[in-house]
Image (tube, rainbow, N blue to C red):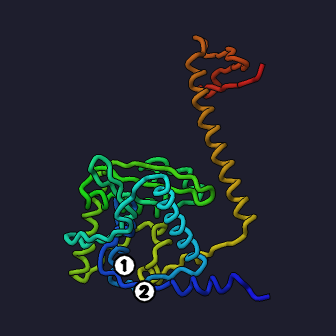
Amino acid sequence: MKSLVQPVLDYKATKISRMPCHTNRASELGYSVPAIGGCVRRGVYARTRWQDRELHDARVQLIFDEGNNQERQVLIDLATAGIQIIEQQSAWLWDMYQITGHIDGTYVEDNVAYPVEIKSMSPNIFTIVNNFDDFKKKPWTRSYMAQITLYMLFKNVDKGIFILKNKSTGELKQITVDLDYELGEACLKTAETINKHISEGTLPDRVEDREICKNCHFKLICLPEISFGEPLRISDGPLFEKRVEKYLELKSIAQESDDLYEIIREEAKAQSGESGELNIIVGKYFLTGKKDSRGAFRLKIETI
C-alpha cells in the first residue's frame, strides 16, 4: 500500500534551506554570548559562512513546524480568552548593533508595551523551567534568555513575558521576567564583537569546551579535524519514548523525596536532646535518631 506519511516528509524536506544572514538575529545571538555559555565564533560564522551551516532533516523539520503550530494556537487561545496580543511577529532592526528580530507579540498594560515570547516545550523541559534562572539549564533555553532581554532593551521596558506550553498536555505557564541589565550588556557587547570581527575579516578564538561545539551548526568548518561521533538522529519509537519519560518522572519524584527527607532530618536533629539522640512521636509517626561513628545524624521513621 502507498505510504501516506512519506509524501509529508518529502514536502517537509522542501522547506529546509540555508538563508543568507546579514545581521545578528536576536533568536540566535544567545548561542554566541559567553556570559551564558555561548561562542562568539559561531555568531561570526552565522553571518560569514551561512552557506556552510549544517542542515537538519525532515523529521527535525516536523518538530520545528509542530512548535510553530502550537505557538500559533496559544495566540488563538489568548485572543479567545479576551487577552489582546498586538504586534504579532513584528520585525525590528536595532541598527546600532546590527541586531534584528521578530517579536511573537506585545501585551499592553498601564500604557506600557511588554514583549511576549511564546515557547512550546517537551514535558520534561516544561516541568523544570519555572523562573528566569531555570532557562540556564539548556543551551537552547539560554538563547531564549538573550532573546527576550534584547526585546526588552529595544522596547525600553523593564519586564518581559514568557508563555510556555507543554507540547504533550497543552498546559500553559507564564513567567514574567525582570530586565537583567548585566545580561543585556553582555548581549550588546557580543553583537559589537561580532560586528568588529566581520568588518575586519577576522575570527575570534574557539571556545575550549567541546561540549558546546557538539551542537553547533558550524562545527564541521570550525573543527574539521575533530570527530564528534555518531550524528544526531531522531528516533520514532513511541514505546522507547514512554520508557524514557517514565524514568525521568520517577527520577524527579526520587529527587523530591530525597530533598524532603533532608529537610525532615534537619528538623528532627534540631529537636534531639542533649545526648544528640531523638525519640519523639509526630502524629502517627515515631521518629528516632542518633549520631553515627562519623558524627552524621541518622534518622529512622516508622508508622505507629
- Above or below, comparing residue 261 to residue 135 in the picture: above
Amino acid type indicated by mark 1: Ala
- Relative placement, left or right, of 241 versus 262 is right
State the SS at label 2. Answer: helix
In the image, which disc is placed on residue 52? 2
Cα separation between marks 1 and 2: 9 Å
Which corner quadrant holds the C terminus?
A: top right
Residue 102 horizontal/vertical position (percent): 36, 69
Residue 33 horizontal/vertical position (percent): 34, 64
In the image, which disc is placed on residue 46? 1
- Residue, far left: 96
Front residue of this view, candidates 219 and 60: 60
- Residue, far right: 1
- Relative placement, left or right, of 245 versus 173 is right
Q: Residues within 10 Å of mark 2 (few under 14, many from 20)?
A: some
Q: What residue is shown at x 24% (from left), y 56% (from top)?
A: 156
Whether residue 119 can be seen here: no
Front residue of this view, candidates 270 and 7: 7
Q: What residue is shown at x 63% (from left), y 23% (from top)?
A: 291
State the SS at label 1. Answer: helix
Residue 84 horizontal/vertical position (percent): 40, 56
Which corner quadrant holds the N terminus?
A: bottom right
